[in-house]
Image (cartoon, rainbow, N blue to C red):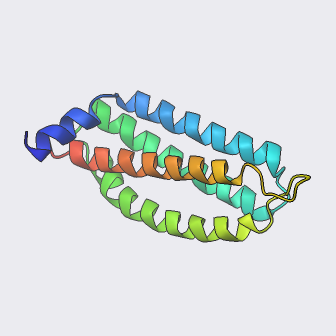
Amino acid sequence: MHWDRLQITLFNLFSGWGWALLLATVWMILACLATFRLRFRSGIMRGLLVATALQALAAGSAAVVTSLDSIDAYACLMGMLGFVATAFVIVVEAGLLIYLSKQWPRNAAGKRDLIVGWVLIWSIFSMVVLIVHVRSAALCTV
């Protein structure tokens, strides 16, 4: 099977609305865990959540627009530029996460509980955002 066919099959398993729902779900899990555990003690957490929300909105809108009209210039542009911008934002967010990990609250045993899960959810969210942008860029060439 050619790579193009595999890409189209893989990216069209879910509609754009499905990808947008997946983004919203993962972002809500990310935000709830940060809100209930860190409780916005740091301004960095608020900025990180706003940045991830903007990423989710941009990727979700590109996914939905691509599903409605795959030849639309907006969807192609959002897919191509969104991938590059998201990769840059992920690198910046990773640096912020390293800084934030030092401020993460500890439990009674002295461990930073839930930070590994939170970083794992953030990684999944970042991968989904990148996949959605790649999907938008790939589908507009069909």
Residue 100: x, y in percent?
73, 65
User: Between 17 and 95, which is closer to the camera in this rendering?
Assistant: 95
Q: Residue at x 92, y 52 (%)?
A: 108
Residue 121 position in % (x across, y down): 58, 46
**Vertical relation: 118 (above or below) 42:** above
| Number of numbered labels in the structure image | 0
Q: Residue at x 19, y 37 (%)?
A: 8
Rendering quarter of residue 70 = top left
Where is 20 relative to 114, above or below? Answer: above
**Residue visible at 56% across and 36% down in the picture:** 24
User: What percent of the width, then of the height, locates residue 56?
Assistant: 52, 45
Position of 129 with respect to 135 (left or right) is right
Q: Residue furthest right?
A: 108
39 left or right, relative to 76 = right
Q: Quarter of the image containing the C terminus?
A: top left
Q: Is residue 31 left or right of residue 7?
A: right
Q: Residue at x 34, y 28 (%)?
A: 14
Quadrant position of the N terminus in the picture:
top left
Can you name the residue that lies furthest to the left here? Answer: 1
Q: Percent x, y for residue 93?
A: 59, 64
Against 71, residue 51 (above or below) is below
